[in-house]
Image (spheres, helix red, strand yellow):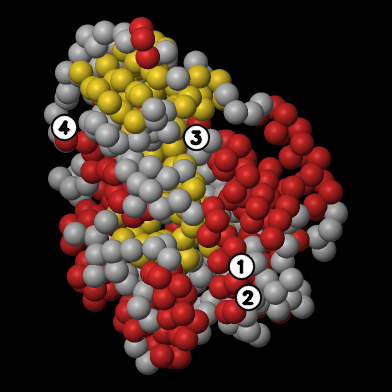
Amino acid sequence: MNYLIKNAQTIFQDSKLNSSTNANDIRISQGVITEIGTQLLPNTSQNERLINAKGCVVYPGFVNTHHHLAQSVLKGVPEGLNQDLGQWLAAVPYRFWPKIPPRLMYLSAKLGIYELIRSGATSCADHHYLYHANSSAEVEAALWQAASDMGIRFTLCRGGATQVGKHKGMSRLNLQPESIEQCLERMQDSLKHHDPSPLSMSRLCVAPTSLIHSASKHDLITLAQFARSNGLKLHSHLLEVEFDQQQALKNHQMSAIDYAHSCDWLGADVWFAHLVKADRQAIELLAQTNTGMSHCPTSNCRLGSGIAPAYAMDKAGINVSIGVDGSASSESGSMLQELNLAWLLQRAQHGAANVPLEQVVHWGTRNGAHSLGLKTGRLELGYAADLVIYDIEELRIASVHDQRLAPILCGEPTQVKYSFINGVPVIDKGLFTRFDPQELAAELKQEMRTFLATIE
Ligand SMILES: [Zn+2]
């Protein structure tokens, strides 16, 4: 079906930075934006449905560039509260993840995707690292299935560790990491999900869990070669805390960013999550090599890691995007919260004359799409019809003067009236079309009870 969105109060168009646009109608045909203007006439011959967007603002869907959907069932674990990254890793993800069964992975992914879509996201890059020597292929399969069932535009950033004997979480549970050969063989199989086209709904990306800790230099170079020979993007965690820098200096006698460079892990096809501790040298090298960053402020606050120099990176020419990170350290799972917090924190650091809100919207939309190599994140002709229609007449935000920015200014909660992904409504008149949230909640509770009984 095709759609004509009519009478929107306003439209957030990329090319109209710092100014309002008069257009209030958008036509969607075959999953793509085909017309933007005023007083567009319905096309009765095209099986076109009319969407009344009166009292609404239309945004490009947010592109989340860093998540761990497996963590949606690990929110608020008591032992992980008030802990820093290292303590939290041991108390929460390492303790639980090797035991997550495929069905729970499926439900966890659906929950995380639900939270993204209800907060204005239409694309998700999930950093999935639930692999060891004997892990089941069904866990990864559950993730692909959940993304497809929920209708989100999806990139699976294939994580994992090949550093035998050095992974504390796995050694505690007597598990062996994958060998590099095993990892490559399994990724080769996952390539069947990879569609390289710009409007792809399903992508694979090579993403060892931590660039500094998860793989040897030899394995990192091998993984980068595998990625580039198959046209895949590269992603990892880097410089979330100072420990990365210390370990790089100790083990490789160079800074973490120089180490990344020496392993062929910088470039326009690479983006890193966090970079909280990126110093001037790191920022310069990231900029020179067109390497991107995923800014995850909620998680960085929650774990006390600090505030990433996102605006300084943006100024240096680095492609800054936004990620919610996993819900074990970022319980809201909300892109809207992430954008709102990114804006506030960067202004607190850089002063009131800096960090315009429109720029932060770009981080959450077009920049995310740029990192993932997708033709989305903009309300422009020929771009994917990934767009979100917010109700700005609802009581909480009806009094905002700048209606174009109302959803981001006010933050959560907000009312998504319609969400289109690839030209298909996943939220229609405020209701999810692909699943029943109450049914998911009921099954999730039951599966979590069974799961928690397996954890010491
Ligand atoms: Zn992460």
Give the left or right position of residue 157, taking residue 104 as reference: left
Q: Amino acid at mark 2?
A: Gln
Instruction: State the separation of the CA atoms marked 1 and 3.
Output: 29 Å
Q: Is residue 285 above or below residue 451?
A: below
The residue carrying mark 4 is: 16
Instruction: State the separation of the CA atoms marked 2 and 3.
Output: 34 Å
Residue 86 visible somewhere in the drawing: no
Query: Which residue is found at the position 28% from the left and 73% from the top?
Result: 282
The residue carrying mark 3 is: 117
Residue 25 visible somewhere in the drawing: yes
Are the residues tagged 1 and 2 within 8 Å (C-beta)?
A: yes
Mark nearer the viewer, 1 or 3: 1
Between residues 205 and 52, which one lies in front from this camera angle?
205
Query: Which residue is found at the position 44% from the left and 32% from the top?
Result: 421
The residue carrying mark 2 is: 182
- Asked which secondary structure carries label 3, the reply is helix
Give the left or right position of residue 398, taking residue 18 as reference: right
Queried on whether the Cβ of the residue with tag 4 lies below 8 angstroms from ligand 1, the answer reads: no
Q: Residues within 10 Å of mark 1 (few under 14, many from 20)?
A: some
